[in-house]
Amino acid sequence: MKFFFTKKQYISFASVAVMLIVWKILATYFDSDFIVPQPEDTFLTVIKLFGDGGFILVAGTTILRGVIGFIVSGVLGMGIGILAGISPGFNAFINPMLVSIRSTPVIALILLALIWFSPDVVPVFIAMLTMFPFICTNVVDGIRSVDNGLIEMARFYRVGTSRIISEVYIPAIMPFIISGASSAMGIGWRAIIIGEVLSQPQYGIGTSMQSAQTFLNVEAVIAWTLIAVLISYGFEKIIRWSERKIVMWKV
């Protein structure tokens, strides 16, 4: 069985190799596991974490929080985004709110959430707030990109509003939704981890990172970081896979 790699993939491999080399150089220079541990030791720690009995519970809980936040923000973002895209007046009303949410520092939102909610709810709330503006804004941009002539023709033939939304607007805005979902997941995933670090729920990657930091276990902190990156990369791949399926469906 032969494996073929594209030029871009070779470049990506080279980028990863450079990062590992820089990591190795820094670890050798400082020669201290309390500052920069050796890459091979960190990767062994990652393997040990995967084999730990509580790993599924810890990682699964964080993933569940991310999925819940993503679904809630997606439903709200699409619903409000469609209304704002169709109605200029509603768009003018909602836009200052979106700007305010997007501009507010995540740490400020977390500190307020710590007052309002239980530790288990804080990461979900933060994920929803950080992802919602990206999805909503992209949906609005997608609605505005729809050909007005097509809408006027549909109305001329007395096509119902619900059918126009389902058969004209939604297919047209799907690429914008995918793009917004990709950006939202990248930002939201980091917010979830930060929320877990500060709120300290019983289970979560952020909680485990904070516990490792308390005991100066730098290897475990970096190992959990790598695991979080892998999970985020997996979500990114799922979103891109969905995008290809949608493009094929539209064709």
Image (cartoon, rainbow, N blue to C red):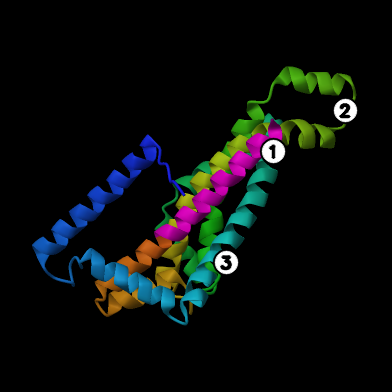
Q: Position of residue 40 (x, y in %)?
A: 25, 67
Q: Would you name the residue on which mark 1 appears?
A: 82
Q: Nearer the viewer, mark 2 or mark 1?
A: 2
Q: Would you name the residue on which mark 2 appears?
A: 159
Does the magenta segment cover residue 178?
no
Could you tell me how far apart the alpha carbons at marks 2 and 3 are, in whole angstroms? 40 Å
Q: In terms of image quadrants, where is residue 89? A: top right
Could you tell me how far apart the alpha carbons at marks 1 and 3 are, in whole angstroms? 27 Å
**Dominant secondary-structure state across the stretch colored magenta:** helix
Q: Position of residue 29 (x, y in %)?
A: 9, 61
Q: Secondary structure at mark 1?
A: helix
Q: Residue at x 59, y 41 (%)?
A: 243
Q: Are marks 2 and 3 in contact (CB under 8 Å)?
A: no
Front residue of 1/197: it is: 1
Compared across the picture, whether 157 is left or right of 106 comes to right
Q: Residue at x 13, y 70 (%)?
A: 32
Compared across the picture, whether 99 is left or right of 29 comes to right
